[in-house]
Amino acid sequence: MPETTTAAHGASIELENLSKRYPGSALPAVDNVSMEIKAGETVVFVGPSGCGKSTTLKMINRLIEPTGGRIRIDGEDVTGIDPVKLRRKVGYAIQSAGLFPHMTVAQNIALVPRMTGWPKKRIRDRVEELLDLVGLDPGEFRGRYPRQLSGGQQQRVGVARALAADPPVLLMDEPFGAVDPITRDHLQDELIRLQHELHKTIVFVTHDFDEAIKLGDRIAVLRERSHIAQFDTPEAILTNPADDFVSGFVGAGAALKRLNLTRVRDVEMRDYPTVTVDTPLQQIFGFLRGSGTNEILLLDKRRRPYKWLRRGDLMRAKGSLARAGTLVHDTVTRDATLRDALEAVLTDNAGRVAVTGRRGEYIGVVDMETLMNSVHELLEADRLEAMEAQHELEEARAHQTHLEQEGPGGVTKA
């Protein structure tokens, strides 16, 4: 009978007066930080370079030993336990993946399960499961070495390795900082999808506020020495920054930044007409004539978006699809934000972007009209919120003026 495992969901994390002081330094690197992170929550640390956010993260799994304070994971004080055992219970993913170059992908992922004494079959099954989970074909990738992977593929393997022993907590230190913007967007989407399935507790460090908005259930905006300037939801920070320091991170265009809070799956997708590369050319002509549209989407044999085909393209194709149409350069997933979709649409003169599923398969299309409607809704919501806040302020001022005019004992002053 095959062995069954129960997936570990997230664990709560409590930081209590956590500090780090390095010898010879006049000021602590991290000074008296207290914070509660709920089980299954994604919390993002964002702040300027050198503010102590990575140091705070590394103290959670004691890669850096605290000078003072307490760390509790699911109520257990982990400050005094064996740090090696602790790290086996806490997944850790870093920038540039940090894979061992002399090990295959499978060996890299299997590292912690092997160290904790898992049986070989369980390890092998886990490697297959995780490669599939992060969107890499096990048959194609398990035997490769890191140098044979792209940057995005290495990061996926890095996340798989961090999840290998099914830890309740996942720490991520700028994991997507070294890849190109398009790959970074897709990796962010992948992490969001994984979190929907796994419900881990994720603590994520970034210097990119847009990334923080996209990924975080809550964001901790940190000043120097990891002092917390504001710890709240992305919506609350965007609409009501605590002070000028936080406003500096939000920057201009808060309404547009709020497009990072809405996912493609939350808006209506168009069901675009599609054909596959196996469809005969005459049938495609007939399809175009019958559909009443001037354009169709050509899918490859795995139903992934391949080319946009217009009538004029087919007329010039002379019986072949090889030279016809425009290659699909960019797609978005259902977990992409509306900001991702807007950027993709703006780079495409035709004003639309294809939406894909977990394995790149076609799902639908989001167009400029849908996105602009969403922008207008957000702007209107911001306008109404500002009017309401102004009205409350005016009422408070009127009330204060009334009290001042009444004077002591409720007697109106002459």
Image (tube, rainbow, N blue to C red):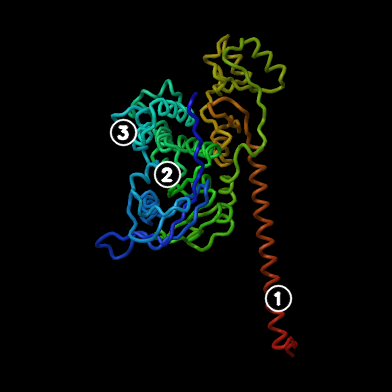
Callout 3 secondary element: loop
Q: Which residue is mark 3?
A: 100
Residue 384 lies in quadrant: bottom right
Q: In the picture provided, is 299 more to the left or to the right than 29?
A: right
Q: Position of residue 284 (x, y in %)?
A: 64, 14
Mark 2 or mark 3: name the one nearer the start of the chain.
3
Q: Amino acid at mark 1?
A: His
Q: Amino acid at mark 2?
A: Met
Callout 1 secondary element: helix
Please identify the quadrant where the C terminus is shown: bottom right
Callout 2 secondary element: strand
Q: Amino acid at mark 3?
A: Phe
- Determine the residue located farthest toward the bottom in the rendered image: 414
User: Label 1: few (<14), some or many (≥20) within 10 Å?
Assistant: few
Mark 1–mark 2 Cα distance, whole angstroms, equals 50 Å
Q: Position of residue 217 (x, y in %)?
A: 54, 49
Q: Which residue is mark 2?
A: 172
Q: Which residue is mark 1?
A: 399
Mark 1–mark 3 Cα distance, whole angstroms, equals 67 Å
Mark 1 or mark 3: name the one nearer the start of the chain.
3
Compared to residue 158, the image places residue 207 above or below, namely: below
